[in-house]
Image: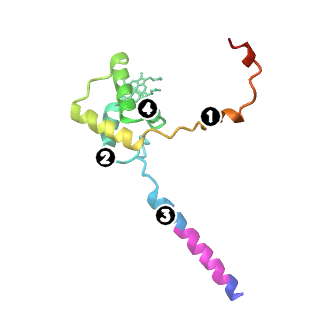
């Protein structure tokens, strides 16, 4: 009986530690905008929420070049204001760091020998 109680206590302690670990490493999210709290989030809030919600931002991802191309597109077609170089750099760094390029979710293509025979092969000139 004592052993059982000890074991139970151990399991509870380990679970609590695991939960604590999860909480410590979770990214902190700003309550109103939903932006990850990290250097530069206020620049994004101040410059990127005039026309649309931050939801459009946090559901996207990309490298610095991808984020830059989005800003250029909004400037060229949506009347977005120019950003001073330093400010733009801060925004791009924030976006690329916190909403960076995701690994591709597509699986690698199958090897040729694993593919079914192509019934039209003989038709290819
Ligand atoms: C002058 C208005 C304006 C400002 C300021 C603005 N955007 Fe946009 N943005 C738009 C419009 C319009 C769209 C297209 C919305 C849609 O598709 O419904 C858009 C779309 C987007 C998208 C989605 C692009 C896609 O491929 O689907 C992202 C991401 C984005 N904006 C990020 C930002 C960021 C980051 C900033 C600040 C640096 C910003 N926006 C500032 C007008 C703006």
Residue 99 horizontal side relative to residue 121, left or right: left
For residue 7, which quarter of the picture? bottom right
Do the residues bearing badges 1 and 3 touch, measured as CB atoms within 8 Å? no
Percent x, y for residue 66?
40, 30
Spatial separation of the CA atoms under disc 4 and disc 2:
20 Å
- Residue carrying label 3: 21
Q: In percent of the image, x 36 and y 35: which residue is there?
A: 64
Look at the picture and state if 26 lies above or below 21. above
Spatial separation of the CA atoms under disc 3 and disc 2:
23 Å
Dot 3: few (<14), some (14–19), or many (≥20) neighbours within 10 Å?
Answer: few
- Residue carrying label 1: 109
Quadrant containing ligand 1 reads top left
Percent x, y for residue 124?
69, 14
Determine the secondary structure under disc 3. helix
In the rendered structure, which disc, 4 or 2, sits on the residue that comes first in sequence?
A: 2
| Frontmost residue, 67 versus 82 | 67
Look at the picture and state if 11 lies above or below 96. below
Do the residues bearing badges 2 and 1 touch, measured as CB atoms within 8 Å? no
Q: In percent of the image, x 37 and y 21: which residue is there?
A: 73
Q: Residue furthest top?
A: 125
Percent x, y for residue 62?
43, 35
Colour scheme of the picture: rainbow
Mark closer to the observer (1, 3): 1
In the rendered structure, which disc, 4 or 1, sits on the residue that comes first in sequence?
A: 4
Spatial separation of the CA atoms under disc 1 and disc 3:
37 Å
Start-end of magenta stretch: 5-17
- Residue carrying label 2: 39
| Frontmost residue, 111 versus 9 | 111
Do the residues bearing badges 4 and 3 touch, measured as CB atoms within 8 Å? no
Mark closer to the observer (2, 1): 1
Mark closer to the observer (4, 3): 3
């Amino acid at each position: 009986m004592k052993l059982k109680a000890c074991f139970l206590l151990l399991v509870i302690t380990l679970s609590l530690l695991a939960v604590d670990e999860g909480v410590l490493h979770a990214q902190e999210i700003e309550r109103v905008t939903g932006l990850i709290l990290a250097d530069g989030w206020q620049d994004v809030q101040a410059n990127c929420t005039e026309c649309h919600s931050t939801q459009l931002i946090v559901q996207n991802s990309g490298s610095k070049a991808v984020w830059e191309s989005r800003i250029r597109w909004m400037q060229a077609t949506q009347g977005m204001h120019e950003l001073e170089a330093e400010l733009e750099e801060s925004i791009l760094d924030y976006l690329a760091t916190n909403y960076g390029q995701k690994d591709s979710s597509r699986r690698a293509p199958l090897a040729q020998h694993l593919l079914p025979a192509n019934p039209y092969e003989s038709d290819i000139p």
